[in-house]
Amino acid sequence: MYQLRCIDCGASFQDDNLYNCTECGGLLEILFDVSLADFKLDGSNISVWKYRSLLPVRIKPVTLFEGGTPIYPFKVEGKGRVYIKHEGMNPSGSFKDRGMTVGVTKAVELGKRSVACASTGNTSASMSMYSARAGLNAYVLLPAGKVALGKLAQAVMHGAKVIAIKDNFDVALRLVRELSEKKGMYLLNSVNPFRLEGQKTIAFEIVDQLGFVPDAVFVPVGNAGNISAIYKGFLELKEAGYTDEIPKMIGVQAEGANPIYKAYVEGKEDIEPLKNPETIATAIRIGMPVNAKKALKAIYASKGKVIQVRDDEIVQAQKLLARQGIGVEPASASSLAGLLKDDSEFENSVCIATGNLLKDPEEVVRVIGKPIEVEADIREIEKVL
Ligand code: F0G
């Protein structure tokens, strides 16, 4: 059905317990026999598990009915047809649920009792929900003071043991990798290739919903797993004979957290770590993306590019989306900010909106302000209308 293959040295493995190549330490990806694909891209019954024939699990899935998220036409001058794929409409409010339904199912399949992750917020919210559903123990390391309130609330309420460390996400990830190895916890960051398999269903759904392959897909990039996964999804559709093309994969990074942008501009295949990443889009405040090599491969192979956007451009795009009824958190608006900044001429493009507005209410209050407060008197109200 599938095997694990190292993206660096090409060694292949049949052991689902691995996250890294035992020969060279490289990242693993899952190589599927795509002739097993048995779904129809006819726009019906869209959800992650519609595409089960290309998902690497053997047991009944742990599911909260993820995927099947809306794709909205978005009005914008001079940019061709633009669609927003609203991943904030998943059960925990972000695209991470697509990965967690597969990753947590794999944890159960492997007989694990505990799962762990480092997170800028959404991964932990999602992991906590799905591990609660499956009855597993969950452990989370977060960068203290840098995780949006909605995400933190989800992680703690669904029962994860949440530990905030006095450092950034990159350090949290290094520590949780060490910890999970020591304690036998199943690691659910995007170094886990099974999790990324769930996320590739974004590509399947885009074609299923639109009925065609768009020219370009704009994706916010932090740890760089999602853009790699979406590219893999488009590649498998082509290999399985569903489609003829692959869209240009366009990664969007915040200017203050831009190692992949820098690598792209210099034509490199890997990044130079960035010590102190900073951006209003805390979800993508990452200086050492673990999936950088996978992402850069996807970007070069699809003839895509990487764009960087300023925080004020992110906020502007977030407001534009909100004014057309699409509520997203800052990181999620970076894909549209990237499209607005880009000078390419595409007939049609899809921007991935990765997480819901409710994830980060404090940012909204900071950029919009609090509502006006007046006495409970009709004349007072009329004065401020
Ligand atoms: N958008 C949102 C809302 C995210 O939460 C993330 C990543 C990304 C984009 C970037 O995706 O890492 O696959 O490139 N959040 C992770 C987390 C890091 O811990 O929740 P990526």
Image: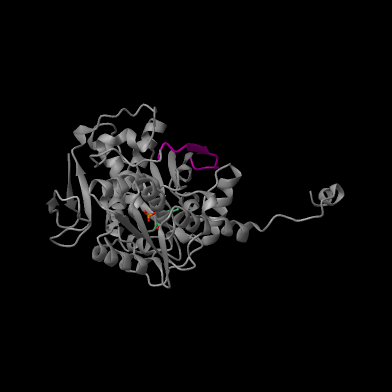
Q: Measured from the top left, where is residue 132 in percent x and y?
A: 39, 49
What is the basis of the colouring in this image?
Answer: one colour
Q: Is residue 220 visible?
A: no
Residue 73 on the magenta segment: yes
Q: Measured from the top left, where is residue 86 in percent x and y?
A: 47, 43
Q: Residue at x 61, y 45 (%)?
A: 323
Q: Residue at x 13, y 51 (%)?
A: 12
Q: Is residue 152 visible?
A: yes
Q: Is residue 213 left or right of residue 242?
A: right
Query: Number of callouts in the render?
Result: 0
Please state the quadrant of the image where ligand 1 appears.
Answer: bottom left
Residue that extends furthest to the right in the rendered view of this protein: 379
Q: Is residue 225 left or right of residue 210?
A: left
Residue nearer the viewer, 110 or 328: 110
Q: Main secondary structure of the magenta part?
A: loop
Magenta extent: 66-80
Residue 193 on the magenta segment: no
Q: Is residue 232 above or below residue 262?
A: above
Q: Measured from the top left, where is residue 267 in percent x and y?
A: 30, 61
Q: Measured from the top left, where is residue 324 in percent x and y?
A: 58, 42
Residue nearer the viewer, 113 or 306: 113
Q: Is residue 213 above or below residue 8?
A: above
